[in-house]
Image (spheres, rainbow, N blue to C red):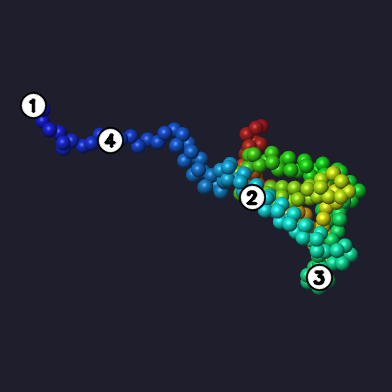
Amino acid sequence: MSEDRADDPPAETSSVPAPNETADSQVTDTDSAEGRLPKPLKTRLLIVIAAVILVFDLVTKIVVVHYVKPGNPIEVFGDVVTLRLVRNPGAAFSMATGMTWLLTVVAVAVVIGVIKIGRTLRSPWWALGLGLVLGGALGNLIDRFFRAPGPFQGHVVDFVSVGWWPVFNVADSSIVCGAILLVVLSLFGFEPNGERVTKSSSDATGEADK
């Protein structure tokens, strides 16, 4: 008759995580440590920022067209800041006024380029900069397609006048701020994928290639 072995310790269960779980946890920990976002989150961030800018730009233009009459500016802070309705056939700040169709093509190319970069984006700062540029480009692009005198020739609605500065709109400000942010990120070595390339590492890479 066999003896009762109730006192024997229970069999140990394996606590080794599955290979996929280990890889996923390592990726998450690395992204958090390096200040990077997972791809789905960076895409959502870029889209949300662009959508907010686009909606704000469209709403302000609709309101200004309805309430501000050409030649009758509305004072906000005396003569320094006014709301002045201007139909702009050119680029931001009334530049290149005789090249409306070309500016439309450039805006389409910018939108395509931002979307392409966004597919590999993992940096929240790059998502912010590209979102600002994308939202502003789409805002002015809608004017090019749907406002008079016609598709690809539409005049952009500008309405913010500050002192001697050329009249601009929300989209113009968004594009400029986003572009400045992207230039700063590039100068300091921050890449769209969330990594930072320093001068020393670049030099080492070049020497290794030699």
Q: Amino acid at mark 1?
A: Met
Which residue sits at x=89%, y=64%?
71
Q: Is residue 129 visible?
A: no
Q: Nearer the viewer, mark 3 or mark 1?
A: 3
Q: Position of residue 175 (x, y in %)?
A: 75, 52
| Relative depth, front residue between 101 and 190 | 101
- Image location of residue 70, percent across then percent down: 88, 62
Rate crowding at label 3 as few (under 14), some (14 to 19) or many (20 or more) other CA atoms within 10 Å.
few
Q: Secondary structure at mark 2?
A: helix
Q: Which residue is mark 2?
A: 48
Tell me how far mark 3 sits from mark 4, CA to CA. 78 Å
Residue 186, x across and y down, in percent: 69, 47
Q: Which mark is residue 1?
A: 1
Looking at the picture, which amino acid does disc 4 mark? Glu
x then y, percent, for residue 50? 68, 50
- Which residue is under mark 3? 75
How far is the residue under mark 1 from the one under mark 2? Answer: 73 Å
What amino acid is labelled 3 in the image?
Glu
Q: Which amino acid is tagged 2?
A: Val
Residue reaching furthest to the bottom: 78
| First-in-chain label (3 vs 1) | 1
The answer to whether residue 20 shows anywhere in this view is: yes
User: On the rendered structure, is 193 left or right of 65?
Assistant: left
SS assignment at label 1: loop
Question: The N terminus appears in which quarter of the rendering?
Answer: top left
Q: Earlier in the sequence, mark 2 or mark 3?
A: 2
Evaluate if marks 1 and 2 touch, with contact meaning CB atoms under 8 Å apart: no
